[in-house]
Image: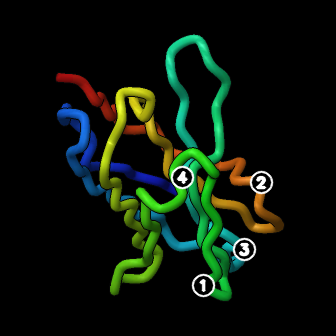
Amino acid sequence: VHIVESGGGLVQPGGSLRLSCEVGESAVPFYAMGWNRQSIGKSREFVAAIRSDNTTHYADSVKGRFTISRGNAKNTLYLQMDRLKPEDTAVYYCAVSWTDMDLNYWGQGTQVTVSS
């Protein structure tokens, strides 16, 4: 299954970005789709996910600022990021899981840099 992210870039603190993800077809439906991120020197961390029943989950650090949603096209995913902070700087990975909330299959990532 291919996963392609886009939409990263450089933004000032307080600004917004929207990440997009296209996920290829799967013979087995996904249990969850979402986003992880990894900053330099840190381990990969969960950001947000949406389950097959459309319930959403967010890391405490992004709750109220980030919104995950599905696109109209099948297996399209978005992450709207508002009120960005320098600590949001990371490579953001779109990821999926077929079994649980552990998003363990991800794409190549897209860089998000929040800096003035």
Spatial separation of the CA atoms under disc 3 and disc 1:
10 Å
Residue 13 — which label? none
Q: Earlier in the sequence, mark 2 or mark 3?
A: 3
**Image side of residue 22 versus residue 29, left or right:** left
Spatial separation of the CA atoms under disc 2 and disc 4:
11 Å
- Could you say where residue 75 lies in the image, as x and y percent from the top left? 47, 74
Q: Name the residue type under label 4.
A: Trp
Front residue of 96/18: it is 18
User: Looking at the image, is 4 positioned above or below residue 13?
Assistant: below
Q: Residue furthest right?
A: 99
Spatial separation of the CA atoms under disc 2 and disc 3:
10 Å
Task: Name the residue: 22% across, 36% down.
Answer: 9
Choose mark 3 or mark 1, whichever is in front: 1
**Image side of residue 75 versus residue 102, left or right:** left
Q: Which residue is mark 2?
A: 102
User: Cβ–Cβ below 8 Å for labels 1 and 2?
Assistant: no
Q: Earlier in the sequence, mark 3 or mark 1?
A: 3
Q: Secondary structure at mark 2?
A: loop
Q: Name the residue type under label 1.
A: Asn
Q: Which residue is mark 3?
A: 31
Q: Which residue is mark 4?
A: 35
Task: Name the residue: 25% across, 51% down.
Answer: 17
Q: Secondary structure at mark 1?
A: loop
Q: Name the residue type under label 2.
A: Asp
Kindly indicate the quadrant of the structure image that contains residue 18: bottom left
Front residue of 30/87: it is 87
Residue 54 — which label? 1
User: Cβ–Cβ below 8 Å for labels 3 and 1?
Assistant: no
